[in-house]
Image (cartoon, grey):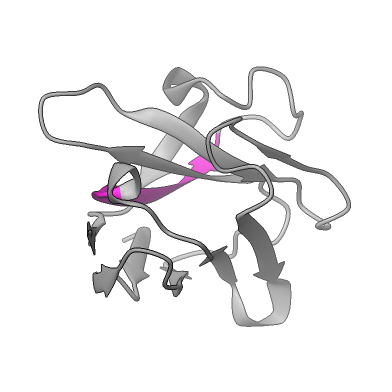
Amino acid sequence: QVQLVESGGGLVQAGGSLRLSCGASGRTFNMDPMGWFRQAPGKEREFVAFINWSGSNTYYSDSVKGRFTISRDNPKNTVYLQMNSLTPEDTAVYYCAAKITYSSAAYYSTSEYHYWGQGTQVTVSS
């Protein structure tokens, strides 16, 4: 069974940092582009960050650019999201996902991803 499992969420004060991890089991995701998305209560799931298979290309939403960093450790089959300078607007459930195709096309679209984790809650207090 293929699984993505996020961890590292929690409660943090505004200005603080968290590092999310996304571990994979069931198959290797070393060649898969990966993405992080988030969903706040009452809102649609939105794109946060993308990384290609080698880590040489990354993209971010405007709202997190300069504060969040996506990275991956292929031997460990793990993707990370380092989140700094957190604000209450970053409060959401964060999901990692594996892209259906190897290209970076439409990296921001949820429909381009097939395997999803169960999500990890990030709460930023003011």
Left or right: 89 in relation to 107: left
* In this view, 106 is above or below 61: above
* In this view, 82 is above or below 112: below
Q: Main secondary structure of the magenta part?
A: strand
Residue 36: horizontal and vertical position, in percent?
48, 46
Total labels: the figure holds 0
> Which residue extends farthest front?
126
Left or right: 12 in relation to 99: left
Q: Which residues are magenta?
A: 91-99
Residue 47: horizontal and vertical position, in percent?
48, 31
Residue 37: horizontal and vertical position, in percent?
42, 40
> Which residue extends farthest left?
42
* Residue at 25% in and 21% down: 44
Q: Which quadrant of the view contains residue 16?
A: bottom left
Q: Which quadrant of the view contains residue 114?
A: top left
Residue 105: horizontal and vertical position, in percent?
72, 19
Quadrant (top left, top right, bottom left, bottom right) of the C terminus = bottom left
Front residue (pair 66, 51): 66
Left or right: 82 in relation to 119: right
* In this view, 108 is above or below 83: above
* Residue at 59% in and 65% down: 28
Quadrant (top left, top right, bottom left, bottom right) of the N terminus = bottom left
As for residue 6 lying within the magenta part, the answer is: no
> Which residue extends farthest bottom?
76
Front residue (pair 56, 99): 56
* In this view, 48 is above or below 45: below
* Residue at 20% in and 23% down: 43
